[in-house]
Amino acid sequence: MNPTNYLVLSIILFSIGAAGVLVRRNALIAFMSVELMLNAANLSFVTFARMHGNLDGQIVAFFVMVVAAAEVVVGLAIIVTIFRTRRSASVDDASLLKL
Amino acid sequence: MGETALFWIMAPIAVLGALGLVFARKAVHGALSLALTMISLALFYIAQEAPFLGVVQIVVYTGAIMMLFLFVIMLVGVDSSDSRVETIRGQRAAATLAVLGVIVLLTGVTVRATLPSEPTGLAQATPDGNVPAIADAIFGTYVWAFEVVAALLITAAVGAMTLTHRERLFHRPTQKELSIKRFTEGPPGEAAGLPVPGVYARHNAVDTPALLPDGTPSEASINRVLVARGAARSTEEFRHHPTPADIEAGAEGETDEPVGGDDDTNGGERA
């Protein structure tokens, strides 16, 4: 099968994730949309690795996963801290840059 | 052939899951549809000669990260849904337009690029199989990056712990101290603790008020949190309203009534 199909799917998923970040006000959903964008990028890494017969793409995708896990941990901790002080998980309420 | 079928079945499911994330009213539904997308991505990885990444995708993403998201959703409140008010006018339309533009632009570039129409495949790059080849790369070429990533993970875990840690500002009273405080400071009626919620033929849940010995329902027997949430039954529901027949029957034995009435008022104050 033509690997370009995977690339187009990855583009669509990435764009949907970008739309989620732009449109949604709930911090958790915006954060999950960022995860969706990272996953879409991973799909194109894996596709390129197979397309060119080079394993490096898979290694990079693996590192992206690890960094995404670290990012999720810190990001969720920030969301929980903001929720404790503001009683809200909306990105609009956290516009003062102080707790 | 099998891969083509898998792609055309799972790709719409993945896109549907992604759309479900963007359009979900509640964060829980969004998290579940994102988990669906991630599982279908794992299948794509396995179909594309990356079985290790496919398993890692399921274990790390759907297993760990999405569960972490669900726990935080439970902490923040499952029903904290979004406000539909646009803070910037026309932002939604502009975002949709920009996203469609990105799709058209990137798809145009990808389709017009001279890419091989058949993948080279990883058979030459991974003669011993996928996992040994990845192990070679991670612990050989990329070993320095691997070490740095390990440090990053530990830093992230410590950072999350310091961010969510809260110092206790007051000494937490022990059970003994609470009991002494009840005897020295509280009203004498509550020295043995507040009355427990009621047990009836129809209800024995914690939201039903107890009946005090004088027959009045006691509001103090219901947990304050339930009252604040409006989840408790009203005490009125359990108050005994004497019918005219009862009053007539009670009028005959009126000599006892003042004593009982006194108790009634005391009980009411206590509650």
Image (cartoon, grey):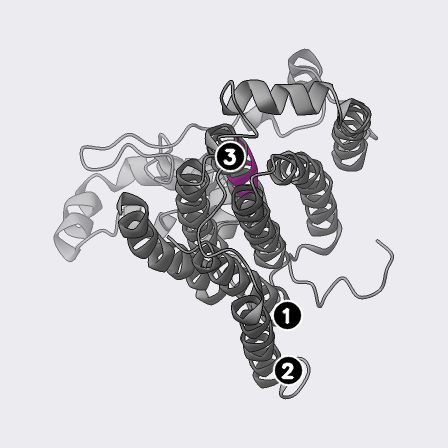
Q: CA distance from mark 1 to mark 3?
A: 37 Å
Judge depth for marks 2 and 3 and give the one in front.
3
Give the extent of the magenta segment: B64-69
Q: Secondary structure at mark 2?
A: helix
Binning the other alpha carbons within 10 Å of mark 1 as few (below 14), some (14 to 19) or many (20 upward) gives some
* Secondary structure category for the residue under label 1: helix
In contact (CB < 8 Å): disc 1 and disc 2: yes
Task: Answer with left or right where residue B186 lies relative to residue B151.
Answer: left
Q: Amino acid at mark 2?
A: Gln
- Could you tell me which residue is drawn at 45 percent across and 67 percent down? B23
The foreground one among B16 and B55 is: B55
> Which amino acid does the dot numbered 3 rest on?
Leu
Q: Badge 3 is on which residue?
A: B122
The answer to whether residue B114 is seen in the rendering is yes
Q: Is B129 positioned to the left or the right of B1 in the image?
A: right
Q: Nearer the viewer, residue B223 or B160?
A: B160
Q: Is residue B191 visible?
A: no
Q: Which residue is mark 1?
A: A22
Q: Toward which corner of the image does residue B143 lie, by quadrant?
A: top right
Q: Amino acid at mark 1?
A: Leu
Q: Residue at x 64, y 34 (%)?
A: A59
